[in-house]
Amino acid sequence: SLQLYRGILKAHRQKLPPVMRDLGDKYVKAEFRLHKNAEGSTLTQFLGQWQVYYDTITGQDAVMGMNMAPNVVEDLSDAQKQQLLQMRHETQAPQ
């Protein structure tokens, strides 16, 4: 998991513009800190989703992101949905 964490931060340095990188790094650090004691299926799911993110961002020439599947959005907690809305707002705010 530490290797994945470092890989994501490295991909951010290589692929993201500064404003998005700062926001992305903060989010990644907070999420990994929050899940550092996760176990079992929670840890497996957490790392699996971050691996998908890593594969997506490293496979793109320009960072465009991708839409989340409706079933994934439905499974998010209210706090996670609010966090996504906040991130969307921050990334779309005028610079």
Image: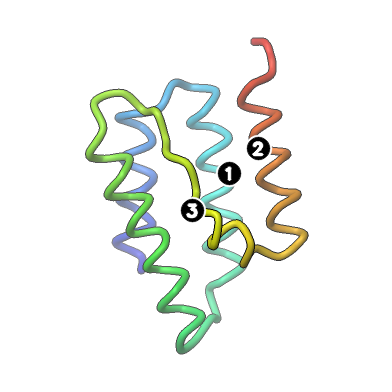
According to the picture, the residue beneath numbered tag 2 turns out to be: 87
Tell me which corner region of the image, top left, top right, bottom left or bottom right, holds residue 73: bottom right
Q: Is residue 47 left or right of residue 86?
A: left
Residue reaching furthest bottom?
40
Q: Is residue 64 left or right of residue 58?
A: right
How many residues crowd mark 1 within 10 Å: few (<14), some (14–19), many (20+)? few
Asked if residue 94 is positioned above or below residue 16 in the image, the reply reads above
Q: Secondary structure at mark 3?
A: loop
Tell me the mark number nearer the camera, choosing from 1 and 3: 3
Instruction: Tell me if mark 3 has few (under 14), some (14-19) or many (20+) residues whose alpha carbon lies within 10 angstroms of its own.
Output: few
> What kind of element bears circle 1?
helix
Q: Residue at x 38, y 50 (%)?
A: 53
Amino acid type for the residue under numbered disc 3: Ala
Seen in the picture, residue 44 relative to 61 is either above or below; the reply is below
Q: Give the residue at mark 1.
A: 26
* Viewer-proximal residue among 4 and 42: 42
Q: Tell me the kind of residue under disc 1.
A: Lys
The label shown at residue 69 is 3
Residue depicted at 71% across the width and 65% down the height: 77
* Spatial CA span between label 2 and label 3: 18 Å
Mark-to-mark CA distance, 1 and 3? 24 Å
Label 1 vs 2, first from the N-terminus: 1
Residue at image location 36% in from the left, 32% down from the top = 13
Query: Which circle, 2 or 3, is nearer the viewer?
Result: 3
- Most distant residue in the top direction: 95
